[in-house]
Image (cartoon, helix red, strand yellow):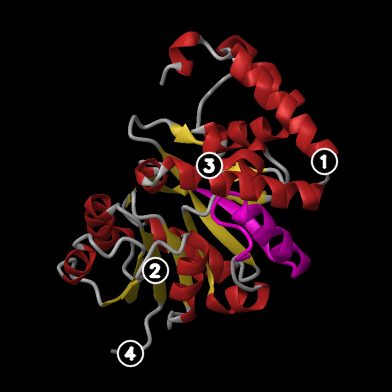
Amino acid sequence: MSTPQLSIIIVNYRSSDALEHCLRSLHVATKASVEVIVVDNSPEEPTRDILHQSGWHGHYFSQERNVGYTLAANFGAQHAAGEYICFLNPDTVLEAHCLDRLMVWIEQHPRSVAGPRERDADGHIVTTAFPPVSRRAIWGANLLYKLPWPRSWHPALPWLIPSYQYADLCRTADEAAAVPVLSGSCLVMAAATWREVGEWNDELTYFGLESEWFARALDHGVRAWYIPEAVMFHEHATSIKRALPSRVRDEADHNRRWHAKRFGWVTLLILAGILWLEHTLRPASQSKE
């Protein structure tokens, strides 16, 4: 096979049922020549067969144990041969031309990384752009994507919490917008950009990876761009929900300590206060979810 235009790297952990839908959606998401690289952290699943039956030229790598997202994603990227790289979560379904639109943006703006608009299973737009320091980076999976503040407060929140500025941008943007950090659920960039900025930081495990990586990217003059005309659906946290709670908790604690050292304990305490208020104010119906 000739050199592919696009290498799609998917890390699977107990999500092979979702992966089947993801791979099927790729047939309408791009017209580019593609190689799919699946790094499987749960080799007991029928992931290899699903990839081989998907109709894509692909590479399957099985890990003997769950090595975590970071090491698996870096391993997949090391085997990528495409001119462009896409990191993609297995619990996603891409709309028609989604990846083509991201690739067109990168072709026109080589010093950039592009991510699509995401919708959840109910069709609601998900926040996938963030400030450099966010609750998501510090607390990660412990937040479980809740909407803690009373809805009557939402119009004022962008003035109080930077994260909500980007939540509003994700909902309302009708053209490409530069942002500090994008969610890693779907990212497209030139392979040369990935090599220049470097791999995901293996001191981190999952949440917070993007904040650290995009800080390095900005040092290299590479910007993150939110592309609303490229759309995908995302189940969100499928692998995390199926992982051992103790492991998720340990990884979140590890990431929290790492970011505290980087940003300082004052920032961490401020974010802790925000999180406590959110839990206190969260409506009872949401706290039971």
Which of the two marks, 1 or 3, is nearer to us in this view? 3
Mark 2 neighbour class, 10 Å CA radius: few under 14, some 14 to 19, many 20 or more: many
For residue 149, above or below residue 84: above
Q: What residue is shown with label 1?
A: 265
What's the amino acid at mark 3?
A: Arg
Residue type highlighted by circle 2: Ile
- Residue hosting label 4: 2
Q: Which-is-in-front pick, marks 3 and 4?
A: 3
Label 1: element kind: helix
Considering depth in this image, is 7 or 282 the residue closer to the camera? 282
Which residue is the extreme one toward the bottom? 2
Q: Residue at x 48, y 17 (%)?
A: 287
Residues shaded magenta: 201-228
Residue hosting label 3? 249
Q: How many marks?
A: 4
Residue at 19% x, 66% y is 54
Q: Secondary structure at mark 2?
A: strand
Badge 3 element: helix
